[in-house]
Amino acid sequence: MKKRTFLAAVAAAAMATGAMAGSHGDGPVKVGFIYVGPTNDGGWNEAHYHSVEQMLEHFGDKVEYIAQESVPEGADAERAMTQMALQGTDIIFATSFGFMDPTINVAAKFPNVKFEHATGFKRADNVSTYSARFYEGRAIQGHIAGRMTKSNKIGYIASFPIPEVVRGINSSFLHAKKVNPDVEMSVIWVSTWYDPGKEADAAKALIDNGVDVVLQHTDSTAPHAAAKEAGNVITFGQASDMLEFAPFPRVSSIIDDWAPYYIARVQAVMDGTWESKDTWDGIGPGMVGIGEITDAVPADVKAEAEALRDAMAAGEYHPFTGPIKTQSGAAWLADGEVADDGTLAGMSFYIEGLVGDIPN
């Protein structure tokens, strides 16, 4: 019997007999994680794993941890979560956008198991979603980039054309443009979250075209290595601090801190209070952190960036505050108008001044 058929048969048998997974009793809560890349990638997956370590330290022997790394988005993710559910896992965290439909599919087969999907928008009675307002951190990166570029050319390595990535591009460009009207941004889409070779090639291509700031929404540190080799290019840590490249080329970073969320959600399973919900937090609640702004950044620029960070944390400033036009020149936000969460969650357009198209 093929592996896929075997898993389907076992799942069907489990449901038919009522021997459902996720029946947490007096023993430890079994917690599962699937990662889209290796947990030592230096970026997205490593940030999740560090938060998991804190969760495990918090609960000790009250939890049992199982995980699978480098799970491709699609059918492989569905198989990985099915296996975890069949092993009696109480709660499964799926930590990549492309795990969304597989999560929904597996959750429908295992209604007693709780599922948590990172950065998605599809929920069910046993599926929650959670994400961070990374665009707040991108605003700070854009401000520093706009103030520090000497060529007025900024590069952006983008992964997939989903709203989360488009928001980041728009936020960083908007804030670079605010402090430097002459700035231009070039975007290279690499269609991968983690491929050091592709990311390095994209960084080198941008640098060869005169870019002296490289931003990224991919998971490896390869762009930093390319910038370091070039010698006059600044970068920012993505998801993790990437401090090994500080103080230059990495001059600051966006740090994802999922630990409080993971602790709260596992505790809810223990308490029997878990319920499906959506969480989207930013700098204020601490889900998005801003890594050290190094001395490679001029003191006045550093002070401006920190003030921007503090204003967002206090709820006094929103990165998408009008007037803002779309790429076509059409009005989007009037003067003083703030983008609503629904529009941001589905953002699929560039703002005015960005060139090129968003891939389908």
Image (tube, rainbow, N blue to C red):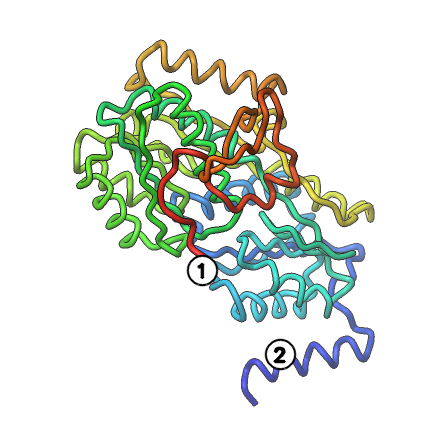
Q: Would residue 314 appear left or right of 206 to someone viewing this image?
A: right
**Label 2's element?**
helix
Callout 2 environment at 10 Å: few (<14), some (14 to 19), or many (20+)?
Answer: some
Residue tagged 1: 70
Residue 55, horizontal then vertical, whole percent? 61, 42
Residue 336, horizontal then vertical, whole percent? 60, 20
What's the residue type where badge 2 is placed? Leu
The quarter of the picture where residue 313 lies is top right
Callout 1 environment at 10 Å: few (<14), some (14 to 19), or many (20+)?
Answer: some
What's the residue type where badge 1 is placed? Ser
Query: Which residue is nearer to you in this view: 74 or 275?
Result: 74
Contact (Cβ within 8 Å) of mark 2 with mark 1: no
| Above-or-below relation of 192 to 234 | below
| Above-or-below relation of 154 to 159 | above
Q: Which residue appears at 61% of the width and 24% of the height?
A: 284
Give the total of numbered labels.
2
**Label 1's element?**
loop
Residue 163, horizontal then vertical, whole percent? 53, 46
Q: Would residue 141 appear left or right of 211 to someone viewing this image?
A: right
Q: Look at the image and tell me in which quarter the N terminus lies.
A: bottom right
Residue tagged 2: 7
Q: Which residue appears at 66% of the width and 50% of the height?
A: 63
Dot placed on the residue nearer the N-terminal end, 2 or 1: 2
In 3D space, how far apart are the residues under numbered discs 2 and 1 (Cα atoms)? Answer: 20 Å
**Residue at far top of view:** 300
The quarter of the picture where residue 43 lies is top left
